[in-house]
Amino acid sequence: ELHSVQEQLTAERLRCSELE
């Protein structure tokens, strides 16, 4: 479960980076 949450956070960070 924790791993899934970390993966989601990473995906969100990557999205933010793309927007930048």
Image (cartoon, rainbow, N blue to C red):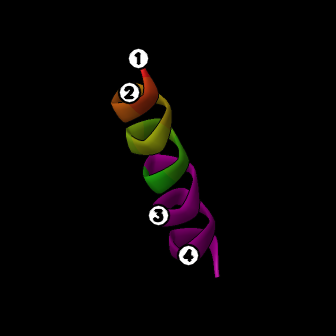
* Relative image position of residue 9 (x, y in whole percent): 57, 50
Separation (CA) of disc 2 from disc 1: 5 Å
Dot 1 or dot 3, earlier in sequence: 3
Q: Amino acid at mark 4?
A: Ser
Contact flag, marks 4 and 3 (Cβ < 8 Å):
yes
Quadrant housing the C terminus: top left
Observer-nearest of 7 and 2: 7
Q: Residue flagged by tag 2: what amino acid is it?
A: Ser
Q: Which residue is mark 1?
A: 20
* Residue 12: % across, % down: 54, 47
The range drawn in magenta is 1-10
Separation of disc 2 and disc 3 at Cα?
A: 15 Å
Q: Residue at x 45, y 43 (%)?
A: 15
Upstream in the sequence, badge 2 or badge 3?
3
- Residue at which label 4 appears: 4
Residue drawn 38% across the image and 41% down it: 14
**Above or below for 2 versus 20:** below
- Labels 4 and 1: the sequence-earlier one: 4
Q: Give the main secondary structure of the magenta stretch.
A: helix
Q: Amino acid at mark 3?
A: Glu
Instruction: Provide the secondary structure element on which disc 4 rests.
Output: helix
Position above or below: 16 against 2 = above
Separation of residues labelled 2 and 4 (CA atoms): 20 Å
Kindly identify the amino acid type of the residue bearing the numbered disc 1. Answer: Glu
**Within 10 angstroms of label 1, few (less than 14), some, or many (20 or more) residues?**
few
* Residue at position x 56%, y 62% in the image: 8
- The circle on residue 7 is 3
Is the residue under label 3 in contact with that under label 1 (CB below 8 Å)? no
**Quick one: SS at disc 2?**
helix
**Quadrant (top left, top right, bottom left, bottom right) of the N terminus:** bottom right
What's the CA distance linking mark 4 and mark 3? Answer: 5 Å
